[in-house]
Amino acid sequence: MSVQGVIIGLEVHVQLTSLKTKLFCGCSSDYRGKEPNTLVCPVCLGLPGALPVLNRKALEYAVMAALALNCKVSKRMFFFRKNYFYPDMPKNFQISQYDRAGGVPLAVNGYLTIEDQNRVKKIRISRIHLEEDPGRLVHLGPIDQSPYTLVDYNRAGIALLEVVTEPDFNSPKEARLFLQKLRSILEHLGVFDGSLEGAMRCDANISLEGGTRVEIKNITSFKEVERALNFEILRQRDLLEKGISVKRETRHWDEARRITVSLRTKEEEQDYRYFPEPDLVPIVLSEEFIKDVKRRMPELPEARMRRFMLSYGLPRYDAEVLVSSKDLADFFEECVKIYNKPKKISNWMMSDLLRCLYENNLELKESKITPQSLVEMIQLIEEGTISVKIAKKILPTMILTGRSPREIVESEGLTKITSRKLLSELIATVFRENPKAVRDALTNEKAVHFLVGQLMKKTKGKADPALANEMIKEMLEAVRRKEGSSKASTPSQ
Ligand code: ADP
Ligand code: MG
Ligand code: ZN
C-alpha cells in the first residue's frame, strides 16, 4: 500500500541487548532501572589515558545480524571518531564507523522483504555500522520546559547497531512493517530484546513529490514511527499546496503533542570531523570467522514460518502473523506442545488474544497469560464446560491477572447451563415475554435466532448453545402442535 509521491528511508539504531558488557569496556550493559552513573569506568567516561578494547561478542552478534539481513560483511575495517561537543558524550566524540574518507561500514548491500496485502517488496539496506550509544539525558517533563538536564552515563558505551536503508519505502505502514520484521529477526538471532524501553530507536527521512527530504530524529517505537511519518506527510503536503517549498531540516517528534518540530536546518548541521580512532586496531575478519558465525545462526522467522505451515498445517497467513514476533511464535509452540491442536490455538491467538493485548496496550511478554492457561481455556470449551462467548469474556481477566480459566469460571459461576429442567423453565419465560417472536418463529428462522439470543441474554451467555437451540426448536414444535389442535377443535364456518 503506497501513498502517492512519498519516499522514506530509515536509519535504525538497535542495542545489542543480549551482551553482558559494553562495546569497549567491561562495564555491565544492564543499565535499565539502575542508580545513575554507577555502571561506568575510565574507558566509558573518557578519562585521560583510558584505552578501549573491542567486545568480541559484539562483533560476532553484529556480523550475525548483517548476515541475517543479507548483507556483504566487510573483511577489513576500522573505527572512526565522530567528534561533537554535547553532554551525552563524556569523551566529546563517539566511536563509530564511517563510509567515507577510506572508511568502510561493517556490512553493505543487504535487503529485507516485507509483505503488505500479498505484495512482496524488497527494501534495500545500504549499510550497517557498529557504534557506541551515548549517555542518557534526563529532563523534568518536556525537554523544552525542563529547568535542568541530568545526565546518566550508564548507557554511554552500550553496543549499537545502525542499520541504514535505501529510500525504498512508499508509505509509513511499509516502514512499520520493516521495523517489525527487523525486530523479529534480531530477536530470533538472540541478540536483541525489543520489549526493552529504548532498545530500538529510529531516524526517519521523508520527502514528497521528489522534493527536499526532512529527517525526523529519535523516534522510539514502531507505532510512533508510523504516526510521525503520517504527520509529516500532512505537514509537507500542506506546505506544497500553499506553494511553499519544504526546507531541508532535522525535526524532532514530540510524542505527547503528536507533531514534529524543527530542531535545526541544514546550515546548522554539524561537521563531525571524522577521523580514524587511533586507540583501536583495525578489525580483520577471516573467512572462517564469518563461516563459523553463519553456521551457528539459529532458525530465522522466514524458515520458522515455512516450518509452521509444514509441520502444523497452518495457512500462510497464520504462520506469518505468528512469526512476526518471536514471543508470539514461542508462545504458540509452547501451546502446541501441551495441546496438539495448532489451528485452534492459532485462531485464538490471532484474533482474541492479539486484540485483547492491543486493547490493553500490552505486549505478550508484559501480560500474565501463559500457554498453559490459554490451552486450559480452549479445553474448557472443548469439554463443554464453557461457551465460546464465556471464553471471550474471561480472556481479558486471564491476561491481566494470570488467574487460571478454570478457577475464574468456577468462582464466578460461569460454567455452562446444561440442565434441561432449568433451560426449559428459562425458555418458557422467554416465550411468555416474546409472544410475537414465538408466533413468527413458527414460519421464520430469523425469529428463532432472536429467541435463542434472548435466552443467551437471560443466562449471560451461559446456556449451552447446542442444547438451547435444540430445546427451543422442540418447544416451538410443541406450540405448533397445540395451535394446530386448537384450530382443529374450533368449529369451521
Ligand atoms: P546523508 O549522508 O545525508 O545522511 P544518507 O545516504 O546517509 O545521506 O541517507 C540517509 C537516509 O536518508 C537514508 O536512510 C536514505 O534512505 C534516506 N534518503 C535518501 N534520500 C532520500 C529521499 N529523497 N527521501 C527520503 N529519504 C531519503
Ligand atoms: Mg547519514
Ligand atoms: Zn565502562
Image (tube, rainbow, N blue to C red):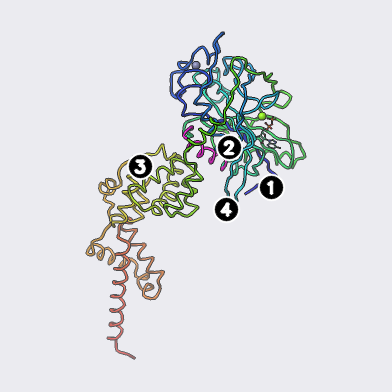
Q: Amino acid at mark 1?
A: Gln
Image vertical order of residue 478 relative to residue 158, above or below:
below
First in sequence, mark 3 or 4: give its number.
4
- Label 3: how many Cα within 10 Å (few below 14, some 14–19, many 20+): some
Q: Nearer the viewer, mark 4 or mark 1?
A: 4
Residue 6's x, y, as percent?
68, 43
- Label 4: how many Cα within 10 Å (few below 14, some 14–19, many 20+): few
Q: Is residue 214 left or right of residue 31?
A: right
Q: Amino acid at mark 3?
A: Thr
The picture quadrant for ligand 2 comes to: top right
Image vertical order of residue 249 relative to residue 314, above or below:
above
Q: Is mark 4 within 8 Å of ligand 1?
A: no
Q: Nearer the viewer, mark 3 or mark 2?
A: 3
- Label 2: how many Cα within 10 Å (few below 14, some 14–19, many 20+): many
Q: Is mark 3 within 8 Å of ligand 3?
A: no
Q: Is mark 1 within 8 Å of ligand 1?
A: no
Residue to which mark 1 is pinned: 4
